[in-house]
Structure formats: structure tokens, C-alpha cells
Image: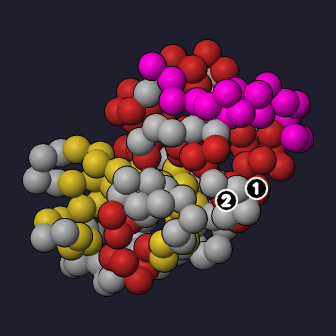
Amino acid sequence: MSFITPEGARKAQLDASDRASVANALLAGAENIIKYNTGVCHDVVAYTLYMRGADISATELVESAGQRWLHKFDYFGGEKWDGYSIIPKGKAIGFYRLVDKTFFHSAITTGNINEVRSVNGFKLGSGWNERVDLSWVLGNRNSDGTFTYDGTKIEVYISSL
């Protein structure tokens, strides 16, 4: 089940440079993702990655939804964020809750140090037009490499996609 809007489908069919322009506008906050994709956090991150030219096919974009994106993002195959390193623009970020061994949220970096955008993520990005500074929201990293978020330990991963 795809959450791509008619306008999102039209933009997804543009050539690579025009898609990249849309992706840059999304990451900058000049465009709202809801115009193109109305899905959950994983869906909007996947759409933006696709528009940036990531290794996501048009078929995957249409056929995948929700948690099925986690396989494609392969967060464990990426790197664990150390809490202070600058994260490059357009990277999918996965938030992993240790207590239930689940990636409960995805966001995408804007290119402004450790800033991300997403939807449905409360303090980690509840609305696309809200910019979230991960360093500020998560605070200092615990000695075991985790962060304490919402009363539980989490890890933050950067997808290599």
C-alpha cells in the first residue's frame, strides 16, 4: 500500500536532477512532505531518499510501506551515531529501542549538523516543517553508547543507503 499522493507520483517520474531539486526543497523545509507522501515516518524518509537518488527503485517506492522499509534502510549495516559527529545531508536515521529490539522511528538529515525532519515521531520529528536537533533532543550519550529517550535506552543508527 503506497501513501504517495498524485502530486508525489508525478514528481517521482521526473528526471534525476528535477527529483533532486524536490528532495532539496523537502530537506530545506521549503516543501512539506504531506504534499507528496502521507505515510508514516519510514514512508516519508524512503520517498525523500528516492527523490535524492538513493538505491530505491520506483517499484519499491510504490510497493513498500511502513516497517517493510526497515529492511531496505538496513540500519544495523550502517553506523551507530556517536552523539556529536556531523551527519551528512540526506541520510536516513533509525532510532532503535533496546527494551523491545525495535526500530521505532526513522528521520532524514537536512545537512545542518545533526538536524533531522520526519513525521509521527514526537520529539524526534512530529511534523515535517519542524526541524529537530538530535544533539539537543537526545542530550549526552550514556557510557554504554546509548541515549535515554522517553524513559528508555535507545541507539541511533545512520543508514548507508
Residue density around tag 2, few if under 14, some if 14–19, many if 20 or more, within 10 Å: many
Query: Image quadrant of residue 155?
Result: bottom left
Q: Are marks 1 and 2 in contact (CB under 8 Å)?
A: yes
Residue marked by disc 2: 27
The residue type indicated by label 2 comes to Leu
Q: Which residues are magenta?
A: 1-18
Residue density around tag 1, few if under 14, some if 14–19, many if 20 or more, within 10 Å: many
User: Which residue sits at x=48%, y=72%?
Assistant: 132
Any magenta on residue 128?
no
Can I make out residue 79 in this image? no
Residue 78 against residue 140 in the figure, above or below = above
Distance between the alpha carbons at the discs numbered 1 and 2: 5 Å
Residue marked by disc 1: 24
The answer to which of 102 and 121 lies nearer the viewer is 121
Any magenta on residue 13?
yes
Residue 53 against residue 88 in the figure, above or below = above
Report x, y in % for residue 102.
22, 44
Q: Quadrant of the C terminus?
A: top right
Residue 23 against residue 17 in the figure, above or below = below
The answer to which of 134 and 147 lies nearer the viewer is 134
Query: Image quadrant of residue 14?
Result: top right
User: Which residue sits at x=36%, y=78%?
Assistant: 137
The answer to which of 15 and 152 lies nearer the viewer is 15
